[in-house]
Amino acid sequence: MTDSLTELTIVQARDGLAAREFSSEELTRAHLNAIEAARDLNLFITETPDLALERARAADARRAKDAAAGPMDGIPIAVKDLFCTEGVLTTAGSHILDGFTPTYESTVTANLRDTGAVMVGKTNLDEFAMGSANVTSYYGPAKNPWNAGDGKNRVPGGSSGGSAAAVAAHLCSASIGTDTGGSIRQPAAFCGIVGLKPTYGRCSRWGIIAFASSLDQAGPLTRSVGDAAIMLDIMAGHDAKDSTSAPVEKPDFEAALGGGVRGLKVGIPREYRIEGAPDEIEALWQQGIEWLKDAGAEPVDITLPHTKYALPTYYIVGPAEASSNLARYDGVRYGLRVPGETLDEMYENTRGQGFGAEVRRRVLIGTYALSAGYYDAYYVKAQKVRTLIAHDFKTAFETVDLILTPTAPSAAFVIGEKMDDPIAMYLNDIFTVPASLAGLPGISVPAGLNPEGLPLGLHLIGRPFDEETVLRAAEALETAAGFNTRPAYLKDA
Ligand code: GLN
């Protein structure tokens, strides 16, 4: 019983709780035991078992009175340690936030908490969400539960690596992450699960530690497309506390499921055929096109001509906003303080020792790009190119309803690879960054295994605020792929 409880999707757990087949306390305990047994994966920065059991018991008490607070009442979730959680250590994976315990709760986690979801802990991530492999965390690398049988640990992807791997390793029913340039979709692909980045503005950013404010967006990581819809229903909505949260109607995402893809036009962008990508990626993409065609959709060749400028644009805009957002960590207001003889020295010591190498690199690039004399050449230029990239998508969406691409140019790589080569690391996001720059919704669906037995994902991009169509098509891919989400880690156990 205990073991099988960790197998359940949200939909199954919701039904089981409603039918009184088990209690939230039993469901939560099963996951807490699994977390304890999987500490070798280093997926959690902070485990919150006491809080989880307290919330689980409260959920059971509500259910006993037939007063469940929502569809996720009593269901265990993990939270990327970038969301501020009231009274629970929040680190952003950085030494500089040592001991930072927020007095407030982010809007997205409050939405989940207030409808009864049970937080089991805060997950590992790249420092300030900067990375594609979860190797820049001050708390050490997170490990992917999938392996190729060669005894080498793979990265779970990043930056929401802990959140993705925790779902794949069945340590929670679902989790939440953030995506700035791919950080939900790419780790979902590497871990063989579903990862949804909603439209920019769909979920409130209030209380999420900022990396690049014009790009950051929260979203769910789940073991099924249906679960992603349920999570988004709870997470999304306009929030007066975030001026970039969109005042748009929130549809019923779960109700959008089951609609199929018959008659939909799916764009296949020719610029996403990149030289040097492994054959398995091209083969998967072709397979995805066939699956959607068999389900009644019509593939259409499209062009997104400015695609090649997306990564350079992102790596100006992202660091520029990061350098500004991270100026607040000065040793005075939050976390770590490393003393010095003078105030300036204290700032320098704190920031020099508190930030890791990747964060310092980005702060330097961003400060340079924003400095007088270079602002027009880099930052303003990047903003103009960003507009052109968004325009490419707008034009494409005049003829197609969705766009299909691979999620990442490879499967999960071995921990330690690409570490000395930031450019190789940045290439991981080549398929996800353009949609981020344009603010569009995107989802990664687990679609198959590579010859080494590692998962690969397919990526769907939709029109702004059209997550419903994205979810419907994702469901069609999920059905066709019939992907078995059990990694070797669980089989070996
Ligand atoms: N890997 C990208 C980066 O390093 C994206 C990170 C993210 O989406 N948070 O910036």
Image (cartoon, rainbow, N blue to C red):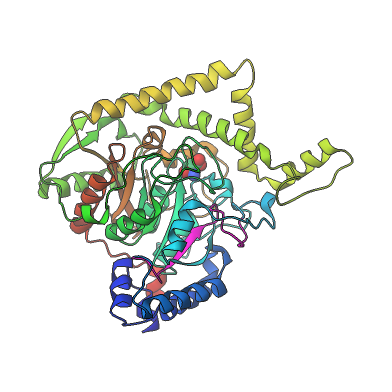
Question: What percent of the width, then of the height, locates residue 467?
Answer: 29, 45
Asked whether 464 falls inside the magenta stretch, the response is no
Residue 283 in sight in this render = no
Question: What percent of the width, then of the height, locates residue 484?
Answer: 28, 65
Q: How many marks?
A: 0
Lateral position of residue 368 relative to residue 493, left or right: right
Residue 105 in sight in this render = yes
Q: Residue at coordinates 62% horizontally, 62% vertically from top-left?
A: 87
Lateral position of residue 132 relative to residue 193, left or right: right
Question: What percent of the width, then of the height, locates residue 292?
Answer: 16, 47
Question: What percent of the width, then of the height, locates residue 101?
Answer: 65, 58
Asked whether 85 falls inside the magenta stretch, the response is yes
Residue 331 found in image quarter:
top right
Question: Looking at the figure, which quarter contains the N terminus?
Answer: bottom left
Residue 347 found in image quarter:
top right
Q: Residue furthest right?
A: 341
Q: Which residues are magenta?
A: 71-90
Nearer to me, 471 or 479: 471
Nearer to me, 4 or 42: 4
Main SS, magenta residues: loop
Is residue 437 depicted above or below 418 in this figure? above
Nearer to me, 416 or 259: 259
Q: Residue at coordinates 35% horizontally, 53% vertically from top-left?
A: 232
Q: Residue at coordinates 47% horizontally, 28% vertically from top-left?
A: 312
Question: Looking at the figure, which quarter contains the C terminus?
Answer: bottom left
Lateral position of residue 434 relative to residue 346, left or right: left
Is residue 115 depicted above or below 242 in this figure? below
